[in-house]
Amino acid sequence: MTTNALPLPEPESAAACCPPLSERPLTAEEAERTAVMFKALGDPVRLRLFSLVASHEGGEACVCDISDVGVSQPTVSHHLKKLREAGLLSSERRGTWVYYKVEPSVLAAMGRLLTRAATA
């Protein structure tokens, strides 16, 4: 099962979609889309889970490898669901386990957003 709640920019379109904050003000649509991602990462457990998946070997992690974050398994599942709904993670069921990976364009788009615009 693969779940993507929000369409995310492809790496090529990230420049047009998500300009650096210092380049120009965000449109209402850009701000809404971006706020969903940052709101999902605003929780320490979610940020830690996102980091565990993003830094895991191969860029993909089984839930069995990332569930030890100091909260119960149902709480881990809840936080992973929120990260999927925000479009930050995708998931795939393989047998009894679910594997998570960071959406390819997410880190690039978020990094570009927080990068200072080039000055002339």
Image (cartoon, rainbow, N blue to C red):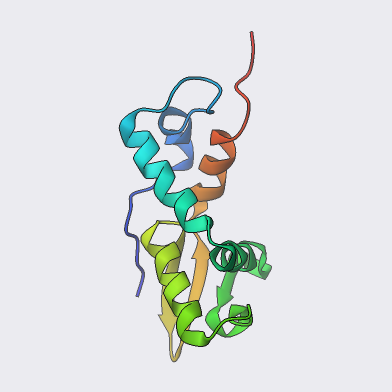
Residue positioned 35% across, 61% down in the render: 4
- Residue farthest to the top? 120
Using the rendered image of the protein, determine whether residue 73 is visible from the camera's viewpoint: yes
Residue positioned 33% across, 49% down in the render: 7
In the rendered view, does 13 fall on the left or right side of 108? left
**Viewer-nearest residue: 51 or 44:** 44
What x and y, as percent, mark residue 76?
Answer: 50, 78
Q: Note whether 98 is above or below 115 in the view shown.
A: below
In the rendered view, does 28 fall on the left or right side of 61? left
Quarter-of-image position of residue 18: top left
Q: Note whether 59 is above or below 104 in the view shown.
A: below
**Image mark count:** 0
What x and y, as percent, mark residue 111?
Answer: 59, 40
Residue positioned 51% across, 86% down in the render: 73
- Residue farthest to the bottom? 96
Using the rendered image of the protein, determine whether residue 9 is visible from the camera's viewpoint: no
Q: Note whether 37 is above or below 80 in the view shown.
A: above
Quarter-of-image position of residue 44: bottom right
In the rendered view, does 105 fall on the left or right side of 53? left
What x and y, as percent, mark residue 102?
Answer: 52, 60
**Viewer-nearest residue: 116 or 103:** 116
What x and y, as percent, mark residue 100?
Answer: 50, 71
Point out the image quarter for the N terminus: bottom left
Point out the image quarter for the C terminus: top right
Q: Note whether 74 is above or below 36 in the view shown.
A: below
